Image: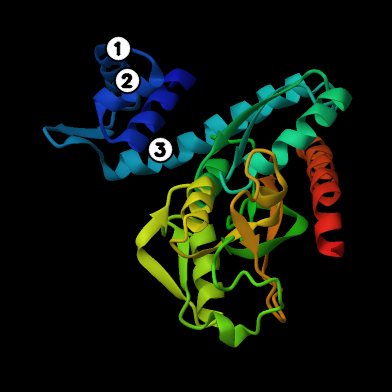
Amino acid sequence: MPTLRQLSYLVTLADCGSFVHASRLANVSQPTLSQQIKALEDRLRVKLVDRGTSGAILTPIGRSIVAKARGVLSEVRDIEALAASASDQLSGTLRLGTTPTLGPYLLSPMIAELHRIAPELRLYIREGIPDQQALELSRGELDVHLGPLPIVGDDLAVEPLFREPLLLVCAVDCELATGRVLEPADLAGQPVISLDARHHFHRQTAEIAKSYGMRLSPDYEGTSLDSLHQMAASGLGLTVLPALYLASDVGGSTGLAVLKVAGWKAHRSVALAWRQSSSMAPAFRIIAEQVQAAARLILDPIVAA
């Protein structure tokens, strides 16, 4: 019978496409990983991997077995989480994925409260691209994901939490920073800086820019919200920033003016997602409540203003 370790090595190899990279990720020597894959092939009596100078390529049966192995490993992790959960109490270590445009500006305020009600819980937080993290969640590489909608996955439970305003900002000395309410026509042709196209936030910014007749600046793409902040504050162009970022100590609005535009209602919807098969759903809903409460505490005064 194949061992869980062998299946884990095979999945890692499939993700990396290289024995060298897979061995580093698995924290074992390359000969050890290679021997374990060979032992798995011998045990199953099929060839799983074509080895060549270009790397490791899965055979057709190898791809099918990797898909099954992901499910097996995910179930094992759920069993481990169930054993650690102690009757649905939050305990053990949870792997939480989130987007860098959200997590740093929302999670910090709620961590202390979550630790108070669940002192045995440990959060391993990893930032990444939302679409990629939804895939990692389905594979069992993450336990729960906090990010903007849509979160796509037939096997995922998605719990909408709140709507976050997205605000248009510019340098404090920008000609548009007059303090008056702007008409949409005032924005026509204005340059807008966005994150690179991998980010869901880029797509939202592009849609907002198009709807107001603004133009994206293809030569200047940010790698983070901080870089958008800095470029906009330097006068390079307008940008769109989330309200949680602008209200946070980590981000903030130094050097920026928030523009008021007639009819402006841009926002993004944020949700928590987990695998439908996960035994930890009650615990995840507790986390969802804490995230929702933390967001409302910050956003309600902004919305009311």
In the rendered image, the quadrant that contains the C terminus is bottom right
Q: Amino acid at mark 1?
A: Ser
Q: Residue at x 60, y 27 (%)?
A: 76
Left or right of 150? Residue 88 is right
Which residue is under mark 1?
A: 29
Which residue is under mark 3?
A: 66
Reading the chain from its start, which is encountered first: label 3 or label 2? 2
Q: Amino acid at mark 2?
A: Ser
Q: How many marks?
A: 3
Q: Residue at x 77, y 36 (%)?
A: 109
| Tag nearer the camera, 3 or 2 | 2
- Mark 2 Cα-neighbour bin, 10 Å: few <14, some 14–19, many ≥20: many
Front-lying residue, 81 or 114: 114
Q: What SS does tag 1 mark? A: loop
- Mark 3 Cα-neighbour bin, 10 Å: few <14, some 14–19, many ≥20: many
Q: What SS does tag 2 mark? A: helix
Left or right of 78? Residue 211 is left
| Tag nearer the camera, 3 or 1 | 1
